[in-house]
Amino acid sequence: MNRIIAKSLLAAAALISFVSCDINKKDDMWKDVYNASVTFRIQEDGSYYLKQDDTTALVVLNSSLSKYPFKDKKEKRALVQYKLYENPENKPANPAAEEYKYTKYVELYSIDTIQTKNPVLYDPDADYGDSSIGLYVSESIFPTTMIEDGYLNLCFNIPVWYNSKHEINVVYGTNPDDPYELVVKHKNVNNVIDGQPQAFIMNFPLKSLPDTGGKTVKLTLKWYSSTQREMVEKQFDYCSRTDW
């Protein structure tokens, strides 16, 4: 299976639906199955496609998913498993998807929606918490912390116990000299420190940041590392999305 997925991370996504493939398929049904994080992009006419990266759109072949699968008709981020069809017999027309350099036709095997939350503008009087957090930033696992389709895809672990409460925020505006500096903040609300680290995924749309004007800039992400016990940072290439 391509792009080996971290099982704990996949389990942490909020499951909205599972699109099961035909159980009568051949034994190699999982051959050439890909894992991806995508944006479900709904169009004015009710059609949709999946945005995988800046140059690639996925058009869904499942007849059961011919209509947008979410009732609120809002854009969604999700983890999906799909099988690629190079030249399907019937290609659904999707002009919006066909504008991208690569248009791929896929059958979805699973959909796991990702919790989405807006970043917050820094307020010196706000209590964002100062608890540590562990971020997955390695390219050798999937999913990982990255910027994709205008979203910060935040993959992290925190110690969770049955009665613990946690708040995760991405704060912008902390550095007046760099508008593209973000800080991940973890607040252990009721100070329950027991529990084993568990993995989670959250996505943060970056539409609040200044427009880069079509240029690619360096975005700095900072967090208080649970392993290094200090503030650490990582830089990402970032270019503003123009169609929010």
Image (cartoon, rainbow, N blue to C red):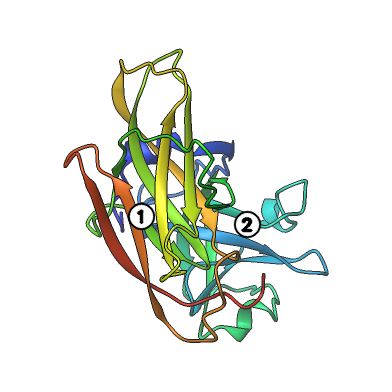
Q: Residue at x 33, y 54 (%)?
A: 222
Q: Secondary structure at mark 1?
A: loop
Which amino acid does the dot numbered 2 rest on?
Asn
Residue 240: image x %, image y %? 53, 75
Residue bearing the label numbered 1 = 145
Which amino acid does the dot numbered 1 rest on?
Thr
Q: Residue at x 52, y 52 (%)?
A: 122
Q: Residue at x 40, y 48 (%)?
A: 184
CA distance for labels 1 and 2: 29 Å
Q: Is residue 213 visible?
A: yes
Residue 67: image x %, image y %? 75, 56
The quadrant of the picture occupied by the N terminus is: bottom left
Q: Is residue 9 left or right of residue 47?
A: left
Nearest to N terminus: mark 1 or mark 2: 2
Q: Nearer the viewer, residue 216 or 83?
A: 216
Q: Secondary structure at mark 2?
A: loop
Q: Nearer the viewer, residue 59 or 44?
A: 44
Q: Quadrant of residue 107?
A: bottom right
Residue 2: image x %, image y %? 31, 58
Q: Is residue 80 visible?
A: no
The quadrant of the picture occupied by the C terminus is: bottom right
Residues marked 1 and 2 touching at CB (< 8 Å): no
Q: Residue at x 47, y 71 (%)?
A: 53
Q: Nearer the viewer, mark 1 or mark 2?
A: 1
The image shows residue 68, relative to residue 54, as above or below, that is: above
Q: Nearer the viewer, residue 70 or 214?
A: 214
Residue bearing the label numbered 2 = 62
Specify few, some or many for label 2: CA neighbours under 10 Å numbering under 14, 14-19, or 20 or more. Answer: some
Residue 70: image x %, image y %? 72, 48
The image shows residue 23, relative to residue 42, as above or below, that is: above
Residue, far front: 125
